[in-house]
Image (tube, helix red, strand yellow):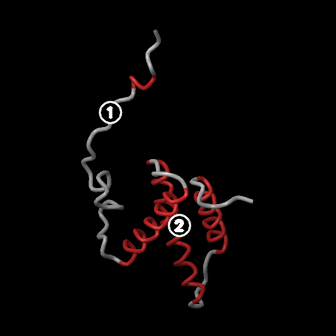
Amino acid sequence: MPRSSRANIPALQQASTRIGNESALLDGVDGRTNGARRFKEIFTRLSTELTQLKRRQTTVESLILMRASFLVIWCEKQEAKLASGEDVDVGAYVTTSNTLRKLLADVELLREK
């Protein structure tokens, strides 16, 4: 009788890092800074929305949401620069916006037409 492929998957060990046990989102970052608080706010909102739409998120989905959260903050900073009259790299902004859209679509938080 063939053995199940699950038999070869090692059991997950208890996480030993602050990120692994979810007491921190980013390594070495003081969670009290404006940027860290904004990152956590966006990540939490995206996670909540994903959970409401489907189910508990996977590790891969969490990693994608972390990257998307960073890109949201980067875009917000570029928008603030533009509103203040500073120059922005429009190409980088468009590329980042498209990457953000793709990441959100990958976790089914964006409705594709």
Image coordinates for residue 100, horizontal then vertical, percent: 59, 63
80 vs 73: above or below = below
Is residue 27 rendered to the left or right of residue 93? left
Distance from Cα at disc 2 to Cα at disc 1? 33 Å
Classify 10 Å Cα crowding around label 1: few (below 14), some (14-19), many (20 and above). Answer: few
Which label was assigned to residue 71?
2
Q: Assign a secondary structure to mark 2.
A: helix
46 vs 59: above or below = below
Q: Assign a secondary structure to mark 1.
A: loop
Amino acid type, callout 1: Ala
Classify 10 Å Cα crowding around label 2: few (below 14), some (14-19), many (20 and above). Answer: many
Amino acid type, callout 2: Leu
Residue corresponding to mark 1:
11
Say which of marks 2 and 1 sits in front. 1
Image coordinates for residue 110, horizontal then vertical, percent: 63, 61
Image coordinates for residue 106, horizontal then vertical, percent: 60, 53
Query: Looking at the rendering, in which quadrant would you find the C terminus?
Result: bottom right
Question: 77 and 58: which one is in front?
Answer: 58
50 vs 72: above or below = above
Residue sitting at 55 percent across and 84 percent down? 81
Residue sitting at 50 percent across and 72 percent down? 73
Is residue 55 rendered to the left or right of residue 17? right
Image coordinates for residue 89, horizontal then vertical, percent: 62, 75
Residue sitting at 51 percent across and 60 percent down? 52
Q: Earlier in the sequence, mark 2 or mark 1?
A: 1
Residue furthest top in the image:
1
